[in-house]
């Protein structure tokens, strides 16, 4: 049944033509949420009682960390689809997501480091949170490196999918690291069940920036997936006609 | 679902579960090593030798911070509301350092069993609020 659904709606060709209509709206949504988040977060949200204006780096650090983990989750889910259902779309989504996720992870680590030096007193520390996010970075880099050494497409998809899938165990470790162990990094400010530990005037731009970063990922993901589809399907008729 | 596919799915779910279990047990066993610091209670129970470098984490005790008249020496107490350890430190303190604030200290006990800190880091909590809100909250609890 899923096979039929896949053939009808998730064919690479349909995906290519349907996303053409989605993309402008995703881009607009990104610009709106990013503009509001940046302007309200940097200029209008009140300064924190103890961190002062330096806390405003939260508007880049938290969204990038959240997005880095969300992208890996998408990557791992695509990996499972690739391994069990051999879906080409999933393999493309997985490969493209990795090359986006690595930059968000790097951004999270760098902004965190810049934030840590004035607030904690150090650029880096090997506590559970920072170390597990560094491992996430290594997983991303390792995935990309593994893909680059395997020439044949099917083998490459399957081997890298195994790496992506097994690495998903790191995600709950990252999330719970500040709860399970003593760390320098503080506990979660935003969690699903508790009230946010941040004032509303500071919260709204933060939520908007998280949405903006996720929209940016989806935007770039779709753009790059379209390129990969053209590349992978270049010998097929519909691509030949498109390129003519 | 196609039976071969179902078998594959179950196989991968089992592999992931087994790996999570193994990793979970390993992390649980290594908990002491993954913890960044001892609390004062743990440190007092751990019988650390003089000279061994350890990390200690807790809160700066109220009314415990004393700056020396000369040099950059400061003495204060680190507490976890149950036990406390007195610290001596010479160096720059982080901006957020103050009484009642969380700290993570790297240092060792010297020959007279006084804890000498080599590095003092401030640890802040996950709460963000404007100064006005903080003042009104403090007014309520005062």
Image (cartoon, coloured by chain):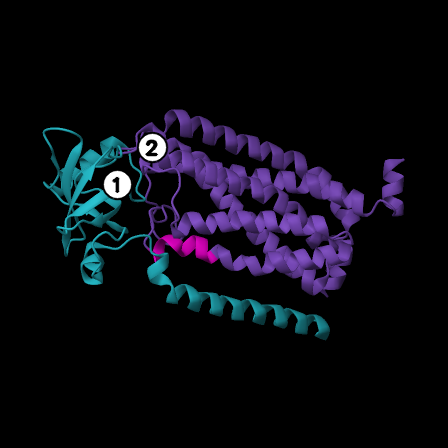
Chain colours: A purple, B cyan
Residue shown at 38%/66% (left/top)? Answer: B28
Q: Nearer the viewer, residue B132 or B45?
A: B45
Percent of width and height locating residue B21: 48, 69
Q: Where does label 2 land, which residue?
A: A118
Callout 2 secondary element: helix
Percent of width and height locating residue A237: 89, 46
Q: Is residue B65 above or below residue B84?
A: above
Which chain is disc 2 placed on?
A
Percent of width and height locating residue A149: 71, 50
Q: Image check: B17 left or right of A24?
A: left
Callout 1 secondary element: strand
Q: Is residue A137 above or below residue B11?
A: above
Which chain is disc 1 placed on?
B
How many C-alpha atoms fall within 10 Å of the one at disc 2: few (<14), some, or many (≥20)? some
Find the magenta span and give its range.
A172-181
Locate residue A58: give its quadrant.
top left
Q: Main secondary structure of the magenta part?
A: helix
Q: Is residue A208 visible?
A: no
Query: Which mark is drawn over residue B120?
Result: 1
Percent of width and height locating residue B120: 26, 41
Task: Assess whether residue A113 is covered by the magenta stretch.
Answer: no
Q: Are marks 1 and 2 on the same chain?
A: no
Q: Nearer the viewer, residue A193 or A91?
A: A91
């Amino acid at each position: 049944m899923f096979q039929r659904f896949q053939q009808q709606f998730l064919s690479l060709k349909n995906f290519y033509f349907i996303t053409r209509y989605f993309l402008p709206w995703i881009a607009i949504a990104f610009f709106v949420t990013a503009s509001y988040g940046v302007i309200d977060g940097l200029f209008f949200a009140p300064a924190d009682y103890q961190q002062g204006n330096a806390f405003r780096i939260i508007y880049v650090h938290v969204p990038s960390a959240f997005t880095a983990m969300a992208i890996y989750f998408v990557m791992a889910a695509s990996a499972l689809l690739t391994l069990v259902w051999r879906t080409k779309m999933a393999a493309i989504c997985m490969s493209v997501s990795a090359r986006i996720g690595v930059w968000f992870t790097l951004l999270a680590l760098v902004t965190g480091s810049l934030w840590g030096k004035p607030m904690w007193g150090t650029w880096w520390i090997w506590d559970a949170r920072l170390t597990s996010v560094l491992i996430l970075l290594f997983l991303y880099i390792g995935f990309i490196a593994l893909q680059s050494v395997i020439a044949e497409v099917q083998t490459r998809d399957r081997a890298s999918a195994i790496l992506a899938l097994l690495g998903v165990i790191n995600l709950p470790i990252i999330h719970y690291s500040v709860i399970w162990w003593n760390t320098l990094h503080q506990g979660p400010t935003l969690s699903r069940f508790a009230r946010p530990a941040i004032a509303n005037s500071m919260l709204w731009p933060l939520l908007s920036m998280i949405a903006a970063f996720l929209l940016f990922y989806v935007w770039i993901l779709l753009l790059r997936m379209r390129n990969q589809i053209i590349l992978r399907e270049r010998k097929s008729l519909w691509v030949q006609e498109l390129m003519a | 679902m196609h039976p071969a596919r179902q078998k594959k799915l179950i196989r991968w779910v089992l592999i992931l579960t087994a790996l999570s279990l193994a990793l979970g047990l390993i992390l649980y066993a290594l908990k002491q090593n993954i913890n960044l610091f001892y609390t004062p209670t743990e440190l007092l129970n751990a019988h650390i030798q003089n000279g061994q470098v350890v990390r200690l984490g807790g809160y700066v005790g109220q009314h415990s911070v004393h700056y020396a008249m000369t040099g950059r020496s400061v003495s204060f107490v680190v507490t976890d509301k149950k036990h406390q350890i007195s610290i001596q430190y010479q160096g720059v303190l982080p901006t957020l350092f103050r009484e009642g604030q969380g700290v993570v200290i790297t240092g060792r006990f010297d020959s007279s069993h006084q804890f000498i800190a080599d590095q003092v880091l401030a640890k802040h909590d996950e709460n963000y609020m404007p100064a006005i809100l903080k003042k009104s909250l403090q007014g309520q609890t005062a």
